[in-house]
Amino acid sequence: MAELTTIHIFLSHGLESGPGSTKIQALKILAETFDKVQAHAIDHRSSKDPAVRLTQMQNAIEASGAHPENIILAGSSMGGWVCAQTSAQMPVLGCFLLAPALAMPAYPQSSPRIQARHVQIIHGWDDDVVPPLPVLKLARQQALPALMLPDGHRLGDSLERVTEEFRMFLSRAGIHKTRTGQK
């Protein structure tokens, strides 16, 4: 049997958050239950500049030695923008975006062309930070799946649903859990 390739999952937090945030840690913990996965929670707290955070993501990917076809990007808010913009520059296996700061005039390249084999956008109808309708418009233009939830920007009432969606997303991307040592 051929050796399984390691999948690298890069997690990017939001503007006022950190790598230890509830959502990022929940996704990281879940990702680590899958076989041959390395989860990297990027620490962007040194800068609030989207371009700097994009460079931090690119540096983390380069340092890991991961190939684009073995990369899944997952991000929330500004971290969602970082992931979407990274995928616009480098086609990746997956892009999982939570309340992504897309279609926002203050951001550079605010409507990136997301290039990933698997994409999922999750957004709250009551998001008062990143308006949902421009994000839905962008999703429609690029034919990307979008799940709308009755929640706000932090998706705090939907953590269980978000982690379940991430589990299903990883499975659709071909990443499976090992059961008693067998694939």
Image (cartoon, helix red, strand yellow):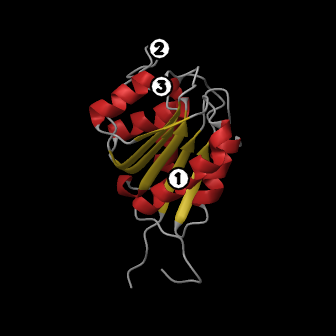
Residue where numbered disc 2 is placed? 106
Q: Is residue 58 left or right of residue 157?
A: left
* Nearest the eye: 74 or 4: 74
Q: Secondary structure at mark 2?
A: loop
Image coordinates of residue 158 in percent, x first then y, are: 63, 42
The image quarter in which residue 142 lies? top left
Give the spatial CA distance, label 3 vs label 2. 16 Å
Q: Are marks 3 and 1 in contact (CB under 8 Å)?
A: no
Q: Image height check: is 141 above or below 96?
A: above
Rendered-image quadrant of the N terminus: bottom left
In the image, what residue type sits under mark 3?
A: Pro
Residue at figure coordinates x 67%, y 48% from the top left: 25
Circle 1: is it few (<14), some (14-19), or many (20+) Cα within 10 Å? many
Evaluate if marks 1 and 2 touch, with contact meaning CB atoms under 8 Å apart: no
Task: Give residue 173's quadrant in the image.
Answer: bottom left
- Tell me residue 94's x, y (percent): 41, 50
Q: Amino acid at mark 2?
A: Ala
Instruction: Locate residue 170, reporting x and y percent.
Output: 47, 58
As helix, strand or loop, the secondary structure at mark 3 comes to helix
Q: Which residue is mark 1?
A: 166
| Circle number at residue 132 | 3
Label 3 and label 1: CA atoms lie apart by 20 Å
Query: Which badge, 3 or 2, comes first in the chain's sequence?
Result: 2
- How many residues crowd around disc 2 within 10 Å: few (fewer than 14), some, or many (20 or more)? few
Q: Residue furthest top?
A: 106
Q: Is residue 123 above or below residue 182?
A: above
Looking at marks 1 and 2 on the same chain, the residue that comes earlier in the sequence is marked by 2
Compute the Cα span from label 1 to label 2. Answer: 28 Å
Q: Residue at x 42, y 36 (%)?
A: 84
Q: Disc 1 or disc 2, which is closer to the eye?
A: 1
Which residue corresponds to the image point at 45% horizontal and 62% vertical from the top-left?
171
Nearer to us of marks 3 and 1 is 3
